[in-house]
Image: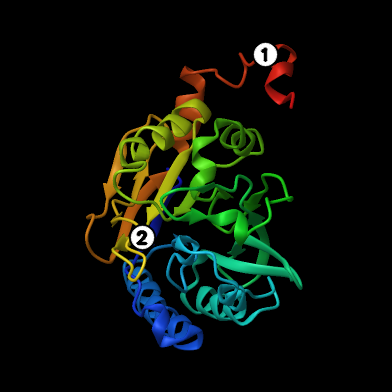
Amino acid sequence: MPRVVRCGLIQAKNVLGPEAGLPAIKKAMLDKHVKLIAEAAAKKVRILCLQELFYGPYFCAEQETKWYHLTERVPDGPTTRLVQKLAKKHKMVIVAPIYEEEQAGVYYNTAAVIDADGRYLGKYRKTHIPHCKPGFWEKFYFRPGNLGYPVFETAFAKVGVYICYDRHFPEGARALGLNGAELVVNPSATVAGLSEYLWKLEQPAHAVANGYFVGAINRVGHEAPWNIGEFYGQSYFCDPRGRIMAEAPRDRDAVVVADLNFDVIDEVRSTWQFFRDRRPDAYGPLVQP
């Protein structure tokens, strides 16, 4: 029998602006996502990924220390514990992006990976941190990740995580493939006019070059008061041949669902022997400062 797993992605508009206060902002988005996760469960999703910084706005549009108060410990914080309960309840693997505090003043853009029985499997910390216009001031908030490119053996598949700006760097995408990933999810926050023309180029290319499935997530809507642009949604799954399998609209909340046949990975890699034909002995200059 083919090894087919139903997978899902959640894209969602932010609910409250900064004037509402951080506790209210966080509660509103958590409440919203609890319902969307239940919707995914009703669709029989077994592996689910949420969007980057899912329990608030994309606050990196400004540089204000108040947003440091959205940080939590991972896995010991309340959001990780909530996601563990939901994963166990719905028998679903959940990848949950969280603003992580390692210690006072040391923060990461992190994704916690929770297995279908509610166990915390580990975390990925965003490796590549942008700091650029219009309003992507992430070095003010995040240290570069220091955990490498882990792949998590979940109940249903081997899952790797790349976060937003990471997707512009093929090196980590290759590392995830070499580490055994069958599905790589990329929770993002990106706006039209900046990188939309790359949205369906880079990640299908990663899928092809490494012979795995990709789930790409983007939030939706305009976020006041910053209005740095339209978060254009269009979350999607693509297969190891780079073909889009399912796609969300650009302008509204959505749970994107696709049935991924992981047996296709062997079929594709038997045709395109990219891993066999690599020449790591010739790539030394790539890792020079």
On the image, numbered disc 2 is attached to which residue?
219
Give left or right: position of 107 versus 15.
right
| Residue in the image at 23% along x and 55% along y | 250
From the image, which quarter does the N terminus lie in? top left
The residue nearer to you, when weighing 54 against 62, is 62
Where residue 276 appears, as percent x and y from the top left, is: 62, 17
Alpha-carbon distance for marks 2 and 1? 38 Å
Check disc 1 and report its element: helix, strand or loop. loop
| Residue in the image at 50% along x and 87% along y | 23
On the image, numbered disc 1 is attached to which residue?
279
Can you say whether 87 is above or below 250 in the image?
Answer: below
| Residue in the image at 43% along x and 29% along y | 205
Where residue 18 appears, as percent x and y from the top left, is: 42, 79
From the image, which quarter does the C terminus lie in? top right
| Residue in the image at 44% along x and 28% along y | 208
Q: Amino acid at mark 1?
A: Arg
Q: Amino acid at mark 2?
A: Arg
Check disc 2 and report its element: helix, strand or loop. loop
Q: Earlier in the sequence, mark 2 or mark 1?
A: 2
Is disc 2 surrounded by few (<14), some (14 to 19) or many (20+) residues within 10 Å? many
Where residue 266 appears, as percent x and y from the top left, is: 51, 30
